[in-house]
Image (tube, rainbow, N blue to C red):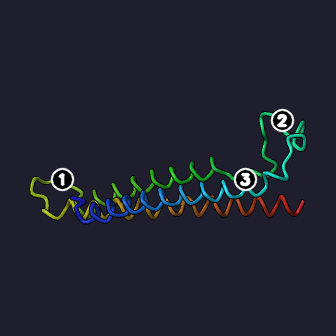
Amino acid sequence: MMDFISIPLVVGIITLGIYKLFDLFVRKKERLAIIEKIGDKFDSSMIENKFSFPFISQQPGTFGTLKIGLLLLGVGLGLLVGFFICQIYVYGPIPNIEVNHNAWEISGVIYGASVLLFGGLGLLIAFFIEMKYLKDKKAE
């Protein structure tokens, strides 16, 4: 059913893995070079009693929960809309025994498109909510 996407997906995962492996080694070398560069100027008395555990970030929240929640809401809504579209247009309002052989492919495209569309809309709504909140907070 999803043969058209399996080959690009596997190639993409392998390419991403190789890229991240090289990126890991390059970043390690960069960090070691930075540590060696500032190692002469650093003294442990410079940071005594300046950090407390647990460390609390001073920047405002990143709204991660809002983004995840609205993404999942959009995916669920997309699945529901895809189900109704498939029930009405692909399988017909009255289920019959003889279903079109392309029904699986058509319903796969409908489900995929609706999930991506509504998931993207959920993230877009989260972005607008975050921007409105930050604008209101800046105005105060």
Within 10 angstroms of label 2, few (less than 14), some, or many (20 or more) residues? Answer: few
Quadrant (top left, top right, bottom left, bottom right) of the C terminus: bottom right
Question: Front-most of 7 and 45?
Answer: 45
The residue most toward the left is 98
Quarter containing the N terminus = bottom left
Q: Determine the secondary structure under disc 2.
A: loop
Q: Nearer the viewer, residue 102 or 5?
A: 5
Circle 3 packing at 10 Å, graded few (<14), some (14-19), many (20+), is few
- In the image, residue 53 above or below residue 16: above
Residues at marks 2 and 3, CA–CA distance in whole angstroms: 23 Å
Q: Quadrant of residue 127?
A: bottom right
The mark that comes first in sequence, 2 or 3, is 3
Cβ–Cβ below 8 Å for labels 1 and 2?
Answer: no
Residue 7 position by quadrant: bottom left
How dense is the environment of label 1, judged by Cα within 10 Å: few (below 14), some, or many (20 and up)? few
The picture places residue 125, in percent across and down from the top left corner, at 61, 61
Q: First in sequence, mark 1 or 2: give its number.
A: 2
Against 55, is 74 above or below? below
Q: Using the numbered discs, state the Cα–Cα distance from disc 1 to disc 2 in whole angstroms.
A: 65 Å
Vertical placement of residue 63 versus 26, above or below: above
Q: Which residue is mark 2?
A: 52
Residue of label 3: 35
Q: Give the residue type at disc 2.
A: Ser
* Marker disc for residue 95: 1
Of badges 3 and 1, nearer the viewer stands 3
Instruction: Give the structural element (helix, strand or loop) at label 1.
Output: loop
Left or right: 59 in relation to 31: right
Whole-percent x, y for residue 139 in the image: 88, 63
